[in-house]
Image (cartoon, grey):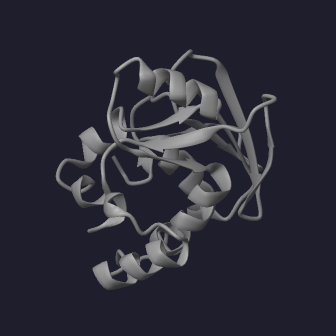
Amino acid sequence: MTFPFSSIVTPFRVRTAGKDRDYFANCAWDAVAIHVALGKEQWIASHCHHCAEDIKIHLRDQRMVSQGSRSEPLIYLALPASKWWENIVLTCSNNMVFFSSKNHLSEWISSGSVTGGEALTIDQTLRLSVPIYKDKMSLDYARPSRERTIAHFQSLGLTGDFWKI
């Protein structure tokens, strides 16, 4: 892991404009956050965690330009923010994933697969990523402070128990 990049093949493939190779992200959130970190137009190829339907997402200028399906994909975060750094490999692996729609997420949850969690749109995830990833590629990068992260969560309306750190 080289947060947000993965050195191994994952289900979260990212291609940036002008590149003839793909990157892999550690999780669905990281796939979106690579756009914020690099500041380049990009295309994400992944799949729905419920049904394995292909998910294609095109990002430009910190917004979603298009998606490859009729419904809007979501990013599901299974673990609360306070748990993310306890085991970051576990957090990313199967706990920050794509769903092709709200219906697919609901069906998956109703199957008893999981309790709790939060789902974000791609645009919400882009906004969430800015202070954490925007300067990630600079040599003097420092993760935002706890206080700054909490303030950012609150500015996006992410205020419930799930977002407490």
User: In this rendering, is residue 45 above or below 138?
Assistant: above
Name the quadrant containing residue 147: bottom left
Q: At 39% across and 39% down in the image, what residue appears? A: 7
Name the quadrant containing residue 151: bottom left
Question: Residue 106, position in %: x, y?
Answer: 52, 28
Give the position of the C terminus as an image quadrant.
Answer: bottom left
User: In this rendering, is residue 114 above or below 130?
Assistant: above
Considering depth in this image, is 33 or 147 the residue closer to the camera?
A: 147
Q: At 46% across and 76% down in the image, what residue appears? A: 154
Question: Residue 12, position in %: x, y?
Answer: 53, 34
Total marks shown come to 0
Q: At 41% across and 17% down in the image, what residue appears? A: 111
In this rendering, would 103 be left or right of 8?
right
Q: At 43% across and 22% down in the image, what residue appears? A: 110
Residue 140 visible in the displayed image = no
Question: Residue 28, position in %: x, y?
Answer: 51, 41
Residue positioned most to the left: 86
User: In this rendering, is residue 33 above or below 92?
Assistant: below
Considering depth in this image, is 38 or 27 the residue closer to the camera?
A: 27
Question: Residue 117, position in %: x, y?
Answer: 38, 44
Considering depth in this image, is 130 or 99 the residue closer to the camera?
A: 99
Residue 136 visible in the displayed image = yes
In this rendering, would 121 be left or right of 113?
right
